[in-house]
Image (cartoon, coloured by chain):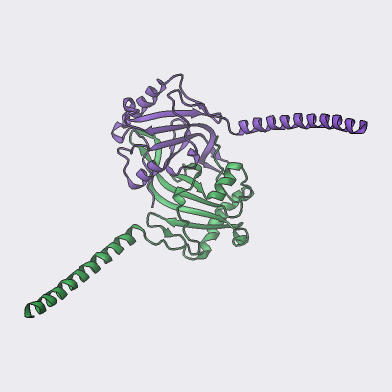
Chain colours: A green, B purple
Amino acid sequence: MVASHVSIVSGGVYMKKIYWLSSIILAMTIGIACALHPSVKPSPNGIQLPVNYKDWPVIAPSYRSDNNTIRVILGNEIAVRAARSGNVVPWPEGAILAKIVWKEKSHEKWTSALLPGKFVHAEFMIKDSAKYSSTGGWGFARWKGLEQIPYGDDANFVQQCFGCHTPVKENDYVFTRPAEMP
Amino acid sequence: MVASHVSIVSGGVYMKKIYWLSSIILAMTIGIACALHPSVKPSPNGIQLPVNYKDWPVIAPSYRSDNNTIRVILGNEIAVRAARSGNVVPWPEGAILAKIVWKEKSHEKWTSALLPGKFVHAEFMIKDSAKYSSTGGWGFARWKGLEQIPYGDDANFVQQCFGCHTPVKENDYVFTRPAEMP
């Protein structure tokens, strides 16, 4: 009976150790998972980062020699369908354009070829004429850097976006032209 | 009976007219369908144009100041998975890279921004180490222009592709570097 009692006690200590070890492993796992999949904060105007935008099809690449950035403009299904059929003035309701921007860098084996270097930001235009009537029917948002920090101190940042896009008002406020494809 | 006979005859003429009209409409429909979906000839080395490559996700854009072209490199599922996880030296078996090339043109409202102009060609690299062992494990193919004309007079054209890619042998013969993304 004494032996049995000791056994139960030492078994209890063992279970406690297992419990604590499991808790530590669980906490570490959650920590690593959070680091790999950080929750991205919404833009100050309430727009959430669109899911899986990196997998959207291409509408066009572009290169800006004035700020040495290389870009690619992607579109959600509604936007790509509109781009491929040439119906983009205006873009249809529900269209989302995603622009990914990188600093340029030269290819080490072909220096006149410019490639994406440091990731700068991802920007979005979301077409909802009713919701965003004060900014040409477009909701604007930007997330900066690999940390995906939302741009803007408050919701007024969109005036900056809209101001810059006003010169292309006749093109539904969009600089991008869908690239010609077969 | 006479009236009935006349009716049958005129009915026959009517059916003949319908038959010919239907045939003409059918022929026109097929003609239009063929014009919209031309069958693209395979490359002289037997490679077929990959289906839906235009919808593949982006691996990187690039810009070449030496020949004034702007490009985007897309990948099939195997290639994109490898690119996103950084496992591209070597690229895995079954990976396909698609490079779409356009002549540059300046944006009319932002002249330092260069956009895709005329479509030049779509090029492909297909990783199959056994099948393409003589060209670094890659099958090469190119289709020129909106008409998608296969490049090369015969299967030897791949020596030209392979020769140009030899300077990047240490990068599994690929110039493209997957763009940094969050």
Residue A28 image position (x, y, % from top left) = 26, 64
Count of numbered circles on the image: 0
Determine whether B79 is above or below B14 in the image. below
Determine whether A36 is above or below B175 in the image. below
In what quadrant of the picture does the C terminus of chain A appear? top right
A118 or A35, nearer to the observer: A35
Q: Residue furthest right?
A: B2
Residue A180 image position (x, y, % from top left) = 56, 37
Q: Quadrant of residue A147?
A: bottom left
The residue depicted at 24 percent of the width and 69 percent of the height is: A23
Q: Is residue A23 left or right of residue A104?
A: left
A110 or A5, nearer to the observer: A5
Residue A16 image position (x, y, % from top left) = 18, 73
Q: Is residue B100 left or right of residue A136?
A: left
Determine whether B165 is above or below A62 in the image. above
Q: Is residue B111 left or right of residue A109?
A: right
Residue A42 image position (x, y, % from top left) = 46, 63
In what quadrant of the picture does the N terminus of chain A appear? bottom left
The residue depicted at 32 percent of the width and 60 percent of the height is: A33
The residue depicted at 22 percent of the width and 71 percent of the height is: A19
